Image (spheres, rainbow, N blue to C red):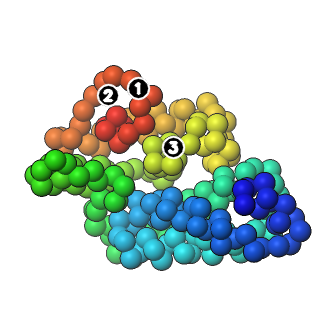
Amino acid sequence: MRESEWLEALREGDFGWFEELVEAYQHRIYALAYRKTLDASEAEDLAQEIFLQFYRKLPLFRGEAALSTWLYRVALNCAASYVRKRRTPLLPGAPPEVVAGGETPGDGLLERERSETVMSALSRLKNKEREVLELFYFQRYSTAMIAEVLGIAPRGVETRLRRARESLRRALTGTGYFEEVTGDASERSIRALV
């Protein structure tokens, strides 16, 4: 079933498609939750809470945006609330999809250290900066889709992206992982980001 069919079923009051939506988005939502919590167990809990909140809020969905866009808006709000309520500080860890294994065990260790440093720097950014970087680099949303999720103009997204990149670069200065972006500026990778 595709999103258009899910929307039609939702209009008819049928929620039987929800499990299919969870299966379609569970990895992306878990990855988002992991980047917010930096802990696998907490990420699972947060991902479940996100889908639960989304399910509870479905009757409020007006169809002004794509269902997936609305899911990410709920996910970002839920994750931000979760992190605010957390009483213990974050311990840096690298999300599984950011760590790329190298040819030798040493390469993998260096990549993991780099990922942990970047994730730690991301956790120190303002929430608005983290959100826009999350959607652009990790979820691979276009600026138009990010504008829809965040409820701002596309030019506002571009401004937030520029400011967030600058903040991240400042946060990484002196870590040994700061690099000027070279080559294709449109390349979407954490390596191009820093």
Q: Give the SS element for disc 3.
A: loop
Q: As shown in the figure, which amino acid type bears the numbered disc 3?
A: Arg
Disc 2 target residue: 181
Q: Give the SS element for disc 1.
A: loop
User: Is residue 172 placed above or below 186 in the rendered structure?
Assistant: below
Image quadrant containing the C terminus: top left
Q: As shown in the figure, which amino acid type bears the numbered disc 2?
A: Val
Crowding at mark 2 (Cα within 10 Å: few <14, some 14-19, many 20+): few
Are the residues tagged 2 and 1 within 8 Å (C-beta)? yes
Identified at 79% across, 59% down, the residue is: 5
Visible residue check, residue 129: no
Q: As shown in the figure, which amino acid type bears the numbered disc 1?
A: Ala
Identified at 41% across, 64% down, the residue is: 34
Crowding at mark 1 (Cα within 10 Å: few <14, some 14-19, many 20+): few
Image quadrant containing the N terminus: bottom right
The one of 63 and 124 positioned closer to us in this rendering: 63
Crowding at mark 3 (Cα within 10 Å: few <14, some 14-19, many 20+): some
Residue mark closest to the camera, 3 vs 2: 3
User: Is residue 85 placed above or below 168 in the rendered structure?
Assistant: below
Disc 3 target residue: 140
User: Is residue 153 placed above or below 57 in the rendered structure?
Assistant: above
Q: In this view, does 3 lie to the left or right of 112?
A: right
Disc 1 target residue: 185
Q: Which of marks 3 and 2 is nearer the N terminus?
A: 3
Visible residue check, residue 172: yes
